[in-house]
């Protein structure tokens, strides 16, 4: 009995020592040992971009560690960092497994992310003008570009561009406004001391503005404040904050050139009366071949254009249009408008100068409005005439003169007007009309309306008809085979008067046709229409 008791005591003693030892070990190892759990996965292996970064007991800890690793990287950079991060978590069940703590996993993830940088995105600003855009590194660069566009027309440096929130946009988009330096300074002073425009100060300011002299008709020329009167942008400008790779930003000098330098841009031109392709090409500084090439409706330099046709031309323009108005003074000689006295008994081809003109002289202040370098309007602000111009006075006819048409249909031009070899005995070496070869019996019509002056045999002309016209001209039709009118008859333009033939001094069947002005033959081809 004593032996059993002693043995039992030894067993109890060792059992207690073993239990105490296990408790101590458990206290130190508990955070890294997984309890036995047979209900599901209780340990998770984490891989980032295919690299094993640790094992944890909580699946959600993987996402937390990745967020912490990203945060550490971003805190070290002043700009936005992009890095490749593919996270994979694999679950399993284990009875007794050592796991990693949060800091260890985060450290390992940070190392993997550093090795997988995609790029660093830098904060900058994108300037949008119509369909054009350019990105620069700072808001100061944006203002420098805008002011560079203004400086071309602001020689006295009186204006500046500034950025304001676009009230028409729901998102934070900046746009521009142009103010004078004086206006900007006054607003700055008011913002610094908002009470300065209150009370008596405000009253005095308004009173001074009300009594300030204005430039009116009585202002002397030397009192005008000449030069730039207003300056603004003619295009909508939008500025947005953007995050881009560093190499996406345009250097400041290059950005200024892109915005302010003239670029060749297509524009529609409406053809005006009197225009030719050569005139239009010269007006826009284009080679004629280039003008033809950019317009599919044109085949070559002889292509016909008509008023109100539309052609594509190129015009040098900067991306950003600057609108400005300038007050300008000049003095010059000027001409008075021509005065006309209508005479309803004369043809429009007749005019007589009743009074010769002489120049006048005046001083002028004008307000010219421009879009870039193109003048769009002019307003006279003040004019003072030193001495009046004397107008030219012209008496002119109002009656439209008669027109002339070819007297036959078809026919071949067989002899022109002017010197020629004698075609047959008795013919002249100086041809006073034109000949059209045509079969005998072809209808001959009056080239213009008038009165038949002669109709019969005319020696070398053979059978001939003379017609006097209201404008004092006369037409003659020779070598006829048959005459269908008599002297004194009134005929209208296009009326049949005879049949062609081969009578008189003739080398073959044809019609001889003349036009006389003041009794002298002229080249008929210069007067008849198509």
Image (tube, rainbow, N blue to C red):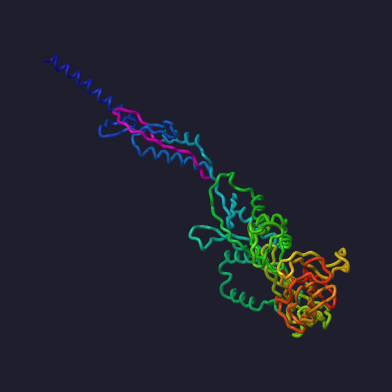
Span of residues in magenta? 79-102
Q: Residue at x 77, y 73 (%)?
A: 480
Q: Residue at x 58, y 66 (%)?
A: 190
Q: Residue at x 65, y 61 (%)?
A: 311
Q: Residue at x 80, y 68 (%)?
A: 434
The magenta stretch spans residue 83: yes
Residue 266 is left or right of residue 416, and the answer is: left
Between 310 and 133, the one lying in front of the other is 310
Residue 233 is left or right of residue 26, and the answer is: right
The magenta stretch spans residue 153: no
Spot occupied by residue 468 in the image (x, y as percentages of width and height)? 78, 80
Please tell me in which quadrant of the rendered image residue 142 appears. Answer: bottom right
Residue 155 visible, this orientation: no
Please tell me in which quadrant of the rendered image residue 515 appears. Answer: bottom right
Between 1 and 282, the one lying in front of the other is 282
Please tell me in which quadrant of the rendered image residue 45 appears. Answer: top left
Question: Considering the image in quadrants, where does the N terminus appear?
Answer: top left
Residue 508 visible, this orientation: yes
Q: Is residue 299 above or below residue 491?
A: above
Q: Is residue 466 above or below residue 249?
A: below
Residue extending farthest top:
3
Spot occupied by residue 177 in the image (x, y as percentages of width and height)? 60, 63
Spot occupied by residue 291 in the image (x, y as percentages of width and height)? 69, 57
Question: Considering the image in quadrants, where does the C terminus appear?
Answer: bottom right
Number of marks: 0
Spot occupied by residue 183 in the image (x, y as percentages of width and height)? 63, 66
Between 367 and 500, the one lying in front of the other is 500
Between 295 and 377, the one lying in front of the other is 295
């Amino acid at each position: 009995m004593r032996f059993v008791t002693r043995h039992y005591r030894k067993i109890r003693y060792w059992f207690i020592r073993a239990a105490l030892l296990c408790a101590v070990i458990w206290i130190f190892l508990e955070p890294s040992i997984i309890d036995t759990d047979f209900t599901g996965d209780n340990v998770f292996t984490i891989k980032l971009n295919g690299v094993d970064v640790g094992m944890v007991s909580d699946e959600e800890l993987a996402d937390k560690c990745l967020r912490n690793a990203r945060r550490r990287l971003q805190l070290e950079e002043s700009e936005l960092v992009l890095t490749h991060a593919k996270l994979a978590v694999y679950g399993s069940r284990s009875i007794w497994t050592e796991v990693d703590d949060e800091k260890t996993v985060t450290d390992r993830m940070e190392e993997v992310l550093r090795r997988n940088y995609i790029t660093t995105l830098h904060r900058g600003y994108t300037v949008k003008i119509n369909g054009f855009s350019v990105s620069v590194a700072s808001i100061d660069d944006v203002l420098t570009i805008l002011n560079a566009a203004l400086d071309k027309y602001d020689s006295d440096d009186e204006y500046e561009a500034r950025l304001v929130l676009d009230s028409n946009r729901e998102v934070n988009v900046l746009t521009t406004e142009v103010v004078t330096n004086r206006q900007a300074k006054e607003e700055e002073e008011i913002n610094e001391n908002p009470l300065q425009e209150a009370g008596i100060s405000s009253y005095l300011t308004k009173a001074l503005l009300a009594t300030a002299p204005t430039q009116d008709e009585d202002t002397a020329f030397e009192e005008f404040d000449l030069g730039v009167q207003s300056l603004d942008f003619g295009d909508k400008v939008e500025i947005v904050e953007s995050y881009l790779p560093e190499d996406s930003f345009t250097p400041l000098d290059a950005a200024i050139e892109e915005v302010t330098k003239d670029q060749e841009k297509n524009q529609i031109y409406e053809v005006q009366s009197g225009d030719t392709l050569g005139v239009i090409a010269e007006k826009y500084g284009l080679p004629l071949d280039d003008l033809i090439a950019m317009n599919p409706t044109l085949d070559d330099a002889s292509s016909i254009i008509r008023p109100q046709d539309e052609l594509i031309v190129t015009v040098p323009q900067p991306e950003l249009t600057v609108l400005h108005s300038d007050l300008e003074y000049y003095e010059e000689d000027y001409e008075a408008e021509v005065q006309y006295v209508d005479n309803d008994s004369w043809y429009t081809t007749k005019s007589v100068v009743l009074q010769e003109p002489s120049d006048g002289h005046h001083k002028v202040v004008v307000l010219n409005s421009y879009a870039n370098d193109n003048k769009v309007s002019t307003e006279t602000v003040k004019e003072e005439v030193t001495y009046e111009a004397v107008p030219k006075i012209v008496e002119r006819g109002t009656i439209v003169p008669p027109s002339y048409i070819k007297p036959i249909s078809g026919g071949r031009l067989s002899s022109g007007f002017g010197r020629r070899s004698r075609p047959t005995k008795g013919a002249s070496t100086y041809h006073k009309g034109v000949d059209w070869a045509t079969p005998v019996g072809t209808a001959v019509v009056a080239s213009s309306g008038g009165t038949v002056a002669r109709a019969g045999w005319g020696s070398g002309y053979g059978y001939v008809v003379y017609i006097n016209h209201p404008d004092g001209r006369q037409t003659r039709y020779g070598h006829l085979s048959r005459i269908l009118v008599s002297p004194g008859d009134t005929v209208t333009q296009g009326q049949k008067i005879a049949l062609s033939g081969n009578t008189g001094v003739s080398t073959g069947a044809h019609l001889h046709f003349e036009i006389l002005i003041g009794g002298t033959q002229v080249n008929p081809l210069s007067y008849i229409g198509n």
